[in-house]
């Protein structure tokens, strides 16, 4: 991942032209053969209604189904399917896509379209001013259309409270999978990433904080998908152990600019 970051910096320093792509959309996918076509069709319909130049990077995180084949079979302009053999985690898949993205702005979004893709308009309005704009379910104006089961809501809120107390007091929702970055900022942040599974969102936002990058939270609509892969509230609790790993990394200076 460091090599991709250094290449990006070299291109900037040398003044070499980069691809003229307005937006890169990174979609991590693990065994998403059923849900992915509908989501990508929604993405296609939105993008073709705009004047944006774009690329869509589906990152197959070592799926055991035919996710890659299904994605490649779709007739969608600008769609690229990136693959590797073994499952590495959502955070790794997002990093894999972001470090290869060529757009001026980069967003990653979940394959289940839990935050409807039309909400991207809200982030695009903010990314001109802020280096990072993220969707939030917990702001005034946010709309949760289909709620999670009570046990998961309780675990999520407890986890969110600890995240705010220990690392990110100013961010209400670190875990909404709908985040946009200015490209230069994304490359710098993701080059420092060390956590590859569910806690990666927390680390990415904490790295942004350490680098002095402003984050704009934006209220969005959100739907709970009953087919989500996070079925147990224990997933949220296990992610909390990564809070202390992030804190330790910070104390060891792993997130500093060289």
Image (cartoon, rainbow, N blue to C red):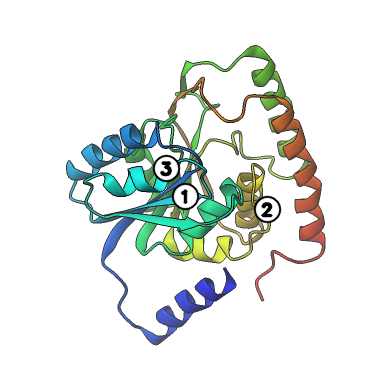
Left or right of residue 58, residue 209 in this image: right
The residues tagged by marks 1 and 3 sit, at their Cα atoms, a distance apart of 10 Å
Judged by depth in the image, the label closer to the viewer, 1 or 2, is 1
Left or right of residue 124, residue 215 in this image: right
Please, is residue 218 above or below residue 83 in the view?
Answer: above
Q: Nearer the viewer, residue 14 or 6?
A: 6
Q: Nearer the viewer, residue 214 or 63?
A: 63
- Of the numbered discs in the image, which one, if any, rests on residue 195? 2
Q: Nearer the N terminus, badge 1 or badge 2?
A: 1
Q: Name the quarter where the N terminus is drawn.
A: bottom right
Q: Residue at x 65, y 71 (%)?
A: 257
Q: Quickly name the residue at label 1.
A: 60
Q: How many labels does the image show?
A: 3
Q: Position of residue 64 (x, y in %)?
A: 52, 43
- Of the numbered discs in the image, which one, if any, rests on residue 82? none
Left or right of residue 119, residue 60 in this image: right
Q: Where is residue 128 in the image (x, y as percent from the top left)?
A: 36, 53
The local secondary structure at tag 2 comes to: loop
Q: Nearer the N terminus, badge 3 or badge 2?
A: 3
The local secondary structure at tag 1 comes to: strand
Q: Name the quarter where the C terminus is drawn.
A: bottom right
Q: Quickly name the residue at label 3.
A: 66
The residues tagged by marks 3 and 2 sit, at their Cα atoms, a distance apart of 26 Å
Q: Position of residue 127 (x, y in %)?
A: 39, 50
The extreme top residue here reads 150
Badge 3: few (under 14), some or many (20 or more) residues near its Cα, within 10 Å?
A: some
Q: Are marks 3 and 2 in contact (CB under 8 Å)?
A: no
Q: Residue at x 18, y 50 (%)?
A: 51
The local secondary structure at tag 3 comes to: loop
Q: Position of residue 163 (x, y in %)?
A: 72, 38
């Amino acid at each position: 991942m460091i090599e991709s970051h250094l290449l990006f910096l070299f291109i900037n320093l040398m003044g070499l032209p980069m691809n003229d792509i307005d937006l890169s959309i990174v979609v991590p996918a693990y065994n998403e053969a059923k849900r992915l076509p509908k989501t990508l069709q929604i993405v296609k319909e939105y993008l073709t209604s705009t004047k944006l130049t774009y690329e869509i990077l589906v990152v197959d995180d070592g799926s055991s189904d035919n996710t890659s084949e299904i994605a490649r079979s779709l007739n969608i302009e600008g769609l690229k399917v990136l693959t590797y053999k073994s499952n590495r985690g959502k955070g790794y898949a997002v990093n894999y896509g972001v470090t290869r993205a060529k757009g001026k702005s980069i967003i990653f979004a979940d394959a289940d379209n839990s935050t409807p893709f039309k909400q991207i308009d809200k982030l695009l309005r903010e990314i001109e001013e802020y280096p990072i704009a993220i969707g939030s379910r917990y702001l005034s104006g946010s709309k949760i259309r289909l709620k999670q089961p009570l046990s998961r809501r309780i675990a999520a809120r407890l986890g969110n409270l600890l995240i705010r107390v220990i690392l990110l007091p100013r961010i209400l929702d670190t875990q909404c999978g709908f985040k946009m970055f200015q490209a230069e900022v994304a490359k710098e942040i993701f080059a420092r990433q060390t956590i590859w599974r569910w806690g990666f969102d927390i680390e990415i936002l904490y790295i942004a904080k350490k680098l002095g990058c402003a984050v704009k939270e934006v209220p969005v609509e959100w739907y709970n998908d009953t087919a989500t892969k996070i079925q147990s509230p224990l997933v949220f609790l296990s992610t909390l152990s990564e809070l202390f790993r992030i804190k330790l990394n910070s104390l060891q200076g792993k997130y500093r600019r060289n």
